[in-house]
Image: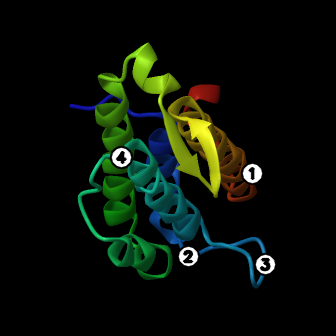
Amino acid sequence: MRRPTKLVALANAMPESAYEWSPMEGVASVARVYMHIARYNYYPDIALGVDAPMGAAEYDSWEEGVTDKEKAVAILGESMDHVRRVTAHMSAMDLEEETRLYGRDVGQWAVLLQLITHMNEHLGQSIAYARMNHVVPPWSM
C-alpha cells in the first residue's frame, strides 16, 4: 500500500461535493487541479526516456473529464507512484545526462526539479482551495 503524499492526503480529505468547486468562473476546479498535477506527472517521461503508460490524449482528457473524487484520488495517487518508480533507480550519472526540456538542453535533474516545482505550486493552490471549503489539511491537525 502506498504512503499517501500530501497531495493525495489532501485530495482524500476534500469532500466529494467540493470536487467541482472553483473559487470563481474561469478558474480550475478542485478536480481539475488534481488532474492537471496527475497529467503533468507523466509528461516528463519523454525527457527522461521513459515510456508513459498511456498516450498524451488520454492524460489531456483527465483535466476536463474527471470530476469523481474516487477516480481523481486514484489517478493522482497512481501518478505519484509513477514518479517514484521512474526516479527510484536514477543514478547521479543519470541525473547529469543531458536531455531537452522546453526547447533547451538541460540535465535530467532539471526535469525532476521542474516536476517538484510544479507539484508544490499546485499543492499550495490545493491548500488554499481546501481552506476556502473549510477543510483543514490532514497534516495540520
Three-letter amino acid code of the residue under disc 3: Met
The label shown at residue 24 is 3
- Whether pointer 1 and pointer 4 mark residues with C-beta atoms closer than 8 Å, the reply is no
Residue 74 locus on image (x, y percent)? 31, 54
User: What residue sits 63% from the left and 57% below the top?
Assistant: 102
Tell me the CA gap for discs 1 and 4.
20 Å
Residue 44 locus on image (x, y percent)? 46, 50
Name the residue that disc number 2 marks. Answer: 20
User: What residue sits 53% from the left and 63% below the top?
Assistant: 36
- Disc 4 crowd rating (10 Å Cα; few below 14, some 14-19, many 20+) is many
Callout 2 secondary element: loop
The label shown at residue 128 is 1
- Disc 3 crowd rating (10 Å Cα; few below 14, some 14-19, many 20+) is few
Foreground: 9 or 99?
99
Three-letter amino acid code of the residue under disc 2: Glu
What is the residue that sits farthest to the right in this orientation? 24
Q: Quadrant of residue 21?
A: bottom right
Whether residue 68 is situated above or below residue 107 in the rendered picture = below
Name the residue that disc number 4 marks. Answer: 77
Q: Earlier in the sequence, mark 2 or mark 4?
A: 2
Whether residue 137 is situated above or below residue 52 in the rendered picture = above
Whether residue 20 is situated above or below residue 88 in the rendered picture = below
Tell me the CA gap for discs 3 and 2.
11 Å
Callout 4 secondary element: helix
Foreground: 10 or 84?
84
Relative to 67, 129 lies left or right: right
Q: Earlier in the sequence, mark 3 or mark 1?
A: 3
Q: Earlier in the sequence, mark 3 or mark 4?
A: 3
Which quadrant would the C terminus be assigned to in this image? Answer: top right
